[in-house]
Amino acid sequence: MSEEVKNKAIKGGEFVIRETPYTDIFIPEEFDEEAKMIRQTCLDFLDTEVLNKLERIDAQEEGLMQSLMDKSGELGMLGVSIPEEYGGFGKSFNTSMLVADAVGGGFSFAVALSAHTGIGTLPILYYGNAEQKAKYIPKLGTGEWKAAYCLTEPNSGSDANSGRTSAKLNAEGTHYLINGQKMWITNGGFADVFIVFAKIDDDKNLTAFIVEKDFGGITMNPEEHKLGIKGSSTRQIFFNDTPVPVENMLSERENGFKIAVNILNIGRIKLGAATIGSARAVLSTAINYANERVQFNLPISKFGAIRYKLAEAATRLFANESAAYRAGQNIDDAYEALVAGGMDEAKAKLKSVEQFAIECAIIKVWCSEMLDYTVDEGVQIYGGMGYSADAPMERAYRDSRINRIFEGTNEVNRLLVVDMLLKRAMKGELDLMGPAQAVAGELMSIPDFGAEDETPFAAEKKIIANLKKAGLMIAGAAVQKLMMSLSKEQEILMNIADIIGYVYVAESVLLRAEKLQQTQPGEHADYAADMARVYLYGAIDKVNAAGKEALYSFGEGDELNMMLVGLRRFTKAAPFNVKEARQRIAKKLIEENKYCF
């Protein structure tokens, strides 16, 4: 294994305690020509086949979504992640992220495609045996068969392992008979293959099965009437003594919950990528309208309040894009390291994503909330027309809202971020205690007022390091004070998760700006620096607010006062004129008449 691969394949969550050099991250500007061609194919497909049919898609015109899936399959869009031996392209994880991003502006079609290629196909690809892969993956890769994922039940949402769907072996020992109800099943109305989770007899944990629609015993309710993504097929599905051959058990008995968790990790980061593509399209539409809409004899893009909205949305988009592709490459690097170490390729795929489950959760939360901010401000920029169903923002606004619920609610994902970090620390996989104790000791010392480092972004890197210290201080104090009861203090855990998430995204965009300045200096790099600083200064305030709320919740007396002093120290920064930086960003957006970064 090369030293380069070793160094890049850092542990998931390690960003909290380790400084990452810009040379070790991937930025979107580094995608090669082949990846860019794949992305352009997806964008062209949306333009020619999807965006001109949105009303028909939302009306769920009979056969239309299936036809679109077939056509996208013919172009190879469904097989980017599938190995060449099964008829796919075998591209990197980050390239599959780029596809999710490119398709993300396709509204309900994006949901159908993502469900099929992700949670519908990957369980078989990663957990199936040789026979199962040979039978199903080629057809799923071309779109000949469409896939759906059946996990959620009426009484089991976030608590997925509490599902009541049952599987019982028949007297002959040839089939499992599945009985139960699944709900909110994306692609349910037209899927040929279902990944179904059920409990065998009195098992504690779920088992996964590959169920073909033609096995029989499957009935469905009519399509759900939803707030958004109206064109996405969403059904309740009932299994009534559905006979499933024993050879269609996926992986091992009671391994279903593990499959669900690991596939959801992939779903989370891919959802983040899709929201990036959606936000890019929404923001470009809003910029175009701001340039066309005239009030007081001026385009509204001339007004500071509108320019603020455009620049802030662009900054959040650029920052979250930086984080998503940074994590995507970390997953690819971890995969390479695991394979170089002798691990089976399919297992390495799963293990590499599992290693970065913390980052996957952060990206899911921050990207989905970034999209919600963008569509909300898009409606505001359109004004009264934004509220009209005849204007483009209405669909984007409604469709966005589900992303904070999909793939685990944002609240659950915030709790997972902290839970996974603490569990890794307790297992000895991450040394959080040492750095936390060092920060506690630093609170008792006199601040270092040594000579200022004048290298590029040195001041900003110091801010990032201090924000990490704030998070370690608060998390360490909360663990010591609350001990085992911390797991019940969800408000405090979410405060800590907010600090960790803002640190990760702020560091990601800063590293991207630094890498651009070092490798591709010029106008684009200068705008990246503006956006990195605007995002960072916003993150400082958010970390300070989350930190105070957490400390007020459990701190007392002199200890509380000392930590508040520490929080002020760790969230202190020299003044920076964010208004002028936003003005520069907005000026570029308005001149280009689209999101152009």
Image (cartoon, rainbow, N blue to C red):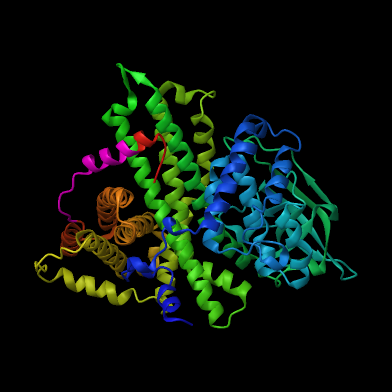
Camera-side residue of 153 and 573: 573
Asked if the magenta segment contains residue 576, the reply would be: yes
Q: Position of residue 166 (x, y in %)?
A: 74, 60
Q: Position of residue 99 (x, y in %)?
A: 56, 52
Left or right: where 166 falls relative to 323: right
Snapshot quadrant of residue 3: bottom left
Left or right: where 301 falls relative to 138: left
Viewer can see residue 151: no
Q: Which residues are magenta?
A: 572-588
Q: Position of residue 334 (x, y in %)?
A: 49, 72
As drawn, the residue found furthest toward the top would be 297
Q: From this view, report whether residue 415 is shown above or below residue 185.
A: below
Count how many numbered circles sit on residues in the image.
Answer: 0
Main SS, magenta residues: helix
Viewer can see residue 250: yes
Q: From this view, report whether residue 337 is shown above or below residue 314.
A: below
Camera-side residue of 208 and 131: 131
In the image, what residue occupies the spot 58% across and 69% down? Answer: 350
Asked if the magenta segment contains residue 534, the reply would be: no
Camera-side residue of 115 and 596: 596
Q: Position of residue 387 (x, y in %)?
A: 47, 24
Left or right: where 78 falls relative to 437: right
Left or right: where 411 falls relative to 301: right
